[in-house]
Amino acid sequence: MNKISVAENNEMEILKRIVLTILILTALTLIFRGWVYRHLVVYKSIGLRPTYLVRDENLVASIEANIGVKKQLGAKEIIPLGLVITSKQLNFTPLPKNSTDPNKLITTVRLLLKQNQLVRKFLS
């Protein structure tokens, strides 16, 4: 009977050590997670986004109408305004070949709207 209890004690000691090691490693991971992340993850610039000169007069008029009287806007004002204008004007599709040029996109939107109007007329 002593041999069984000694073997059980050894197993319990090993199990306690394993659980204690896991708890210590988990605590260290939680404490130093920011440091580890900052030293393992590195951001590298892959280049700059292209800029586009807006040539479509309707797009320029739409932007100016949404800007209103304020002509000098900072980046903090331009970003939400651009998102609002974009959500009003464009419908996004998951097609991989969409252009990123806003002049082409606004023309494509007009063509799609005309196609939708023709389909509605045909169906009604």
Image: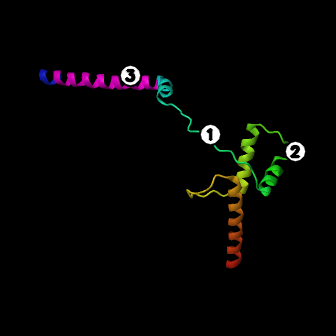
Give whichever of 35, 7 is nearer the camera.
35
- Among numbered discs 2 and 3, the one appearing first in the sequence: 3
Tell me which amino acid carries mark 3. Answer: Ile
Front disc: 2 or 1: 1
Tell me which amino acid carries mark 1. Answer: Leu
Q: Quadrant of residue 9?
A: top left
Q: Is residue 37 left or right of residue 104?
A: left
Residue with the mark numbered 3: 24
Q: Is residue 42 left or right of residue 63?
A: left
Residue with the mark numbered 1: 48
| Residue 83 percent across, percent down from the top left | 70, 47
Tell me which amino acid carries mark 2. Answer: Val
Tell me whether the residue at label 2 lies in contact with that at label 3, contact meaning CB atoms closer than 8 angstroms.
no
Which stretch is magenta?
A: 6-30
| Label 3: few (<14), some (14–19) or many (≥20) C-alpha neighbours in 10 Å | few
Of helix, strand and loop, which one carries label 3?
helix
Marking on residue 31: none
Of helix, strand and loop, which one carries label 1?
loop
- Among numbered discs 1 and 3, the one appearing first in the sequence: 3
